[in-house]
C-alpha cells in the first residue's frame, strides 16, 4: 500500500551468498541479474555505442542548425531565426525535471525511448514544415532529446555491470565532443545536396535508428520510485525556467531594460520561488527537498554548470577570434574558413573525449571524482587564461585548445560519477535532472553575459561595410571575455574542492522506505509519509 510504510519480502538473489554484503551490493548494482556478466560483452559494447551515437545528435544538431540558419531565414523571410535554437533549448530545459521524475517512477529506458520517439517526430515535422511557425514547433519537440543525456547515464548506472559503469558514463558524457570534428563537413554535404531540410531529415532518421538500436541492446532498469507525480510543481518550475531562459535569450535583442525582458525575467523568478515554496508544502514534491539541502549536490551542480557554460562560451568565442582576416589589424584572426577552423576545433573536441576516458579509467581504480573535477576545472582555468593572453599564434592556440579540452573532458565525465556517488539509484534520474536544468541555464546565460560586456565596451571601430556586416571586437575585448571564463572556472574549481572527501549518499526515503520487488521483478521504493 502506498504511504503505509509496509514492507514486502524481497526475492532471494542467487549470488547474494557470494557477496560480503548483499544489501549494499543490491544498492550498488541493483538490477544485475543472477549470472550476469561482470565484464564487457559484444551486446554491452553495442548498447554503449548506440547511446553515445544518439547523444552525438545533440552536438551535431546545434552546430548544423546554426550553420543552416541564414538559409532558413532567407527561405521563410523571417528575422526570428533565434527561435530555432531557443525553442529546442527551452523545451529540453522545461521538460527535464518532469522527465527525470517519470524516469525514476516508470523506468529509465521507457522514458528514454519515448523522448527519442518524440524528438524524431519533431525533426520530421521540422523537415517537412510548410511554414516557419510549424518549423519552430517541430524543433521544440525535437528538444526532448536534451534530457536523454542524464537519463542515459542513470540507466547505465542501473543496468551495466558494476566494473564498467565509471568508464561507460564518462564515455557517454564526453563522447559529445568528438562529433564536433566532422560536423562542418557533414553540414556542408547536407546543405549542398538537400538544402536545409536535408539536415532535419538526417536528424529524424538517425535519431530513429539509434533509438531502435537502444531498444534491442539495452535492458530496462529494475528500479522504481513509488511516488505520486507532482504536476503543480512541474508546471511552476517549467514556467520559471521558461521565463528566465526567454529573458536571457532575447534580452540582447529586446533590450535588458525593456518591458518584455523584465516581465519574462521577474515572472520566471516568481514562478521559481513559488516552486520552492511548493517543495516544502506538498507531501510528494517533484524534487525531494533534501536534495536542495544536500551540500554535496549543490556543489556538484555549481561545478557542472560552470563546466557546461564554459564549453558553450569557448565554442562561441573561438571562431569569432580565429576566422577574421589578419588585415583587420586587431591583433587576432587568421582568416580561416569554416572548414579550416577544424584545426582549432578538432584538438579541443578530441581531448574532451580523451579526458573523459581518463576519468573513467581512474574512477574505476578508486581515484575520487572530487579530485578529478577540481583538476579538470584547474586545467580549464589555465586554458582560458593562456588563450586570453596569447591568441595571435596558431600553434599556441592549438596547444591551449588541448589544455581546455582536457579540462572540460575531466569535468564532463566527473559530473555523472559524482552524482552516482551522491544519491541512491532510486533518486538518480530526478537528481541528475536538477543538475541538468542548471547546466542548460548556464549554457544559455554565460555567452549572453559575456557579449553584453563586449557590446557595451569593446566593439572595434571598423565599418560594417568592410566586414560584411559582422561586428568585430577589440583585442582587449577578447582578453576580457576569456578572463571572465577563467573566473567562472575558478568558481567551479572551488566548488569541487569544497566537496567532502567522502560524500554521504542521499537515500530514497522520507519518513519510511519500503523496498521490495513487484510481480515483474522490478525493485521498488515506496515513499511513506
Image (cartoon, rainbow, N blue to C red):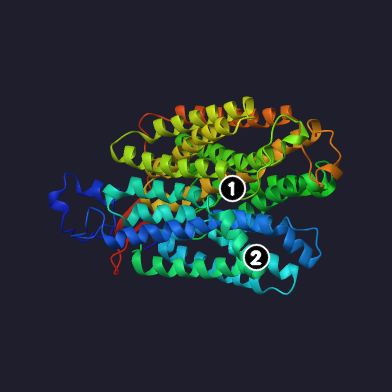
Residue 504 rendering spot, x and y as whole percentages:
37, 36
Kindly identify the residue that appears in the image at 52 percent across and 32 percent down: 399
Helix, strand or loop status at disc 1? helix
Q: Is residue 231 left or right of residue 178?
A: right
Kindly identify the residue that appears in the image at 54 percent across and 52 percent down: 282
Residue 149 rendering spot, x and y as whole percentages:
48, 54
**Residue 3 picture quarter:** bottom left
Q: Which residue is label 2 attached to?
A: 192
Compared to 329, does 264 lie above or below?
below
Q: Earlier in the sequence, mark 1 or mark 2?
A: 2
Residue 351 in view here? yes
Q: Is residue 188 left or right of residue 324?
A: left
Kindly identify the residue that appears in the image at 80 percent across and 34 percent down: 459
Judged by depth in the image, the label closer to the viewer, 1 or 2, is: 2
Residue 447 or residue 90, whichever sits in front: 447
Residue 221 in view here? no
Residue 12 rendering spot, x and y as whole percentages:
18, 59
In the picture, the disc for residue 440 is 1
Helix, strand or loop status at disc 2? helix
Compared to 331, does 44 lie above or below?
below
The answer for how far apart the CA atoms under marks 1 and 2 are is 32 Å
Q: How many marks?
A: 2
Kindly identify the residue that appears in the image at 45 percent across and 30 percent down: 374
Residue 1 or residue 394, whichever sits in front: 394
Q: Residue furthest left?
A: 17
Mark 2, other Cα within 10 Å: few <14 / some 14–19 / many ≥20: few
Amino acid at each position: 500500500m502506498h504511504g503505509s510504510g509496509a514492507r514486502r519480502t524481497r526475492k532471494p538473489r542467487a549470488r547474494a551468498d557470494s557477496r560480503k554484503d548483499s544489501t549494499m551490493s543490491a544498492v550498488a548494482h541493483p538490477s544485475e541479474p543472477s549470472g550476469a556478466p561482470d565484464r564487457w560483452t559484444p551486446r554491452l559494447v553495442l548498447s554503449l555505442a548506440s547511446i553515445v551515437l544518439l547523444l552525438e545528435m545533440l552536438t551535431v544538431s546545434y552546430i548544423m542548425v546554426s550553420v543552416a540558419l541564414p538559409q532558413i531565414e532567407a527561405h521563410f523571410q523571417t528575422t526570428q531565426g533565434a527561435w530555432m535554437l531557443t525553442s529546442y533549448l527551452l523545451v529540453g530545459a522545461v521538460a527535464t525535471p518532469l522527465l527525470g521524475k517519470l524516469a525514476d517512477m516508470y523506468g529509465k529506458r521507457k522514458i528514454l525511448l519515448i523522448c527519442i520517439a518524440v524528438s524524431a517526430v519533431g525533426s520530421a515535422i521540422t523537415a517537412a514544415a510548410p511554414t516557419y511557425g510549424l518549423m519552430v514547433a517541430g524543433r521544440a519537440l525535437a528538444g526532448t532529446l536534451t534530457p536523454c543525456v542524464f537519463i542515459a547515464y542513470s540507466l547505465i548506472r542501473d543496468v551495466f555491470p558494476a566494473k564498467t559503469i565509471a568508464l561507460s558514463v564518462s564515455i557517454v558524457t564526453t563522447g559529445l565532443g568528438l562529433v564536433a570534428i566532422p560536423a562542418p563537413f557533414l553540414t556542408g554535404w547536407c546543405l549542398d545536396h538537400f538544402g536545409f531540410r536535408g539536415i532535419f531529415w538526417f536528424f529524424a532518421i538517425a535519431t530513429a535508428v539509434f533509438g531502435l538500436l537502444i531498444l534491442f541492446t539495452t535492458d530496462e532498469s529494475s528500479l522504481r520510485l513509488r511516488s505520486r507525480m507532482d504536476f503543480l510543481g512541474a508546471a511552476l518550475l517549467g514556467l520559471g525556467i521558461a521565463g528566465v531562459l526567454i529573458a536571457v535569450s532575447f534580452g540582447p535583442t529586446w533590450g535588458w531594460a525593456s518591458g518584455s525582458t523584465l516581465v519574462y525575467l521577474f515572472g520566471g523568478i516568481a514562478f521559481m520561488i513559488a516552486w520552492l515554496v511548493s517543495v516544502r508544502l506538498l507531501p510528494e514534491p517533484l524534487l525531494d527537498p533534501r536534495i536542495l539541502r544536500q551540500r554535496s549536490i549543490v556543489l556538484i551542480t555549481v561545478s557542472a554548470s560552470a563546466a557546461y557554460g564554459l564549453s558553450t562560451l569557448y565554442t562561441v568565442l573561438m571562431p569569432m577570434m580565429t576566422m577574421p582576416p589578419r588585415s583587420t589589424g586587431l591583433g587576432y584572426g587568421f582568416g580561416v574558413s569554416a572548414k579550416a577552423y577544424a584545426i582549432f576545433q578538432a584538438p579541443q573536441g578530441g581531448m574532451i573525449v580523451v579526458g573523459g576516458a581518463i576519468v573513467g579509467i581512474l574512477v574505476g581504480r578508486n581515484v575520487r571524482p572530487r579530485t578529478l573535477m577540481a583538476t579538470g576545472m584547474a586545467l580549464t582555468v589555465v586554458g582560458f587564461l593562456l588563450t586570453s593572453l596569447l591568441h595571435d599564434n596558431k600553434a599556441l592556440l592549438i596547444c591551449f585548445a588541448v589544455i581546455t579540452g582536457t579540462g572540460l573532458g575531466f569535468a564532463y565525465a566527473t559530473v555523472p560519477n559524482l552524482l552516482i556517488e551522491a544519491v541512491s539509484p532510486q533518486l538518480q534520474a530526478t537528481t541528475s535532472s536538477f543538475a541538468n536544468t542548471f547546466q542548460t541555464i548556464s549554457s544559455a546565460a554565460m555567452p549572453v553575459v559575456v557579449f553584453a560586456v563586449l557590446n557595451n565596451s569593446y566593439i572595434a571601430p571598423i565599418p560594417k561595410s568592410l566586414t560584411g556586416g559582422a561586428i568585430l571586437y577589440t583585442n582587449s575585448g577578447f582578453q576580457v571575455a576569456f578572463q571572465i571564463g577563467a573566473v567562472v572556472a575558478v568558481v567551479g574549481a572551488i566548488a569541487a574542492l569544497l566537496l567532502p572527501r567522502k560524500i554521504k549518499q542521499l537515500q530514497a526515503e522520507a519518513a519510511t522506505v519500503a523496498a521490495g520487488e513487484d510481480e515483474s521483478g522490478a525493485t521498488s521504493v515506496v515513499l511513506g509519509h
